[in-house]
Amino acid sequence: ALDIEKNSPSPNIEVVDLSHPFLPEKFAEATDDAEFKILMANLKLTLDDFESNDFELLAIHTNLKDFKLSFLINLKLNVLLAKNDNEITIKSNDGTGKFSRFSFDDLKQDITWELIKNQTNFNSNKQNIGFFTEDTITMNLIPELKTADYLLKIDNIDSSFKSEEVIQKINTIQNVSTIYKVDTTNLKSINNL
């Protein structure tokens, strides 16, 4: 309880109208004119509160370099994927893997496109025991999709978005062997994106 004298102004106390229609009655109850009990609700946020399921994830199998694939996707889909300097970085016991990505924010449709390399190679940070051994580590951004070379994440889509059209257009790119929609509900490493 907080004791406040009715006519004693204090620079640290701000008078708040607790009868506001948007404040639930349980948050403030007056016991008399000078004493108020304010009951605060605990708010617990989890990462699930910030997750957004309004995206499509497409897996692409190709031997094309990332810049070449992004250029060809730009031509086919009329988007402007550009190299993003903020690579996705994942640390492991063996070292740090960096995954290149190309991004485009379509402000007209409020859609974000990201082409992300799914596989990277780096030298192990562990000490070499032999004379000529240097361990090269291969890491996948989404280990459940080890065979996919690239991932195309299309964010902020609604029910009218037609991923089949995107798949058909990218599939016409020479050296793209296959492209398919990924079911993201059971991917354990989806937060790597």
Image (cartoon, rainbow, N blue to C red):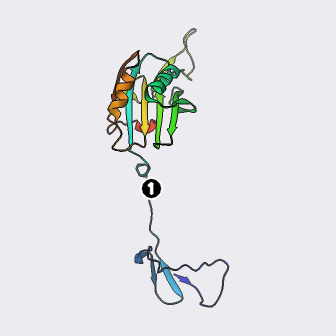
Q: Position of residue 174 (x, y in %)?
A: 41, 15
Q: Is residue 146 visible?
A: no
Tell me: 122 left or right of 189: right
Residue at image location 50% in from the left, 83% down from the top: 36
Tell me: 42 left or right of 184: right
Residue at image location 66% in from the left, 85% down from the top: 9
Q: Is residue 14 visible?
A: yes
Label 1 element class: loop
The vertical placement of 40 against 130, above or below, is below
Outermost residue to the right: 11
Q: Position of residue 20 (x, y in %)?
A: 47, 78
Q: Position of residue 40 (x, y in %)?
A: 47, 71
Amino acid type indicated by mark 1: Leu
Tell me: 185 left or right of 51: left
Outermost residue to the top: 132
The picture quadrant where one finds residue 54 is top left
The vertical placement of 33 against 118, above or below, is below
Q: Considering depth in this image, is 105 or 189 the residue closer to the camera?
A: 105
Residue at image location 45% in from the left, 62% down from the top: 43
Considering the image in quadrants, where does the C terminus appear? top left
Tell me: 139 left or right of 128: left
Task: Count all numbered tags in the image, as a single digit.
Answer: 1
Q: Position of residue 55 (x, y in %)?
A: 39, 40
Q: Considering depth in this image, is 168 or 28 the residue closer to the camera?
A: 168
Task: For label 1, count other residues whose C-alpha is less than 10 Å away and answer few (under 14), some (14-19) or many (20+).
Answer: few
The vertical placement of 185 against 16, above or below, is above
Question: Which residue lies under the disc numbered 1?
Answer: 45
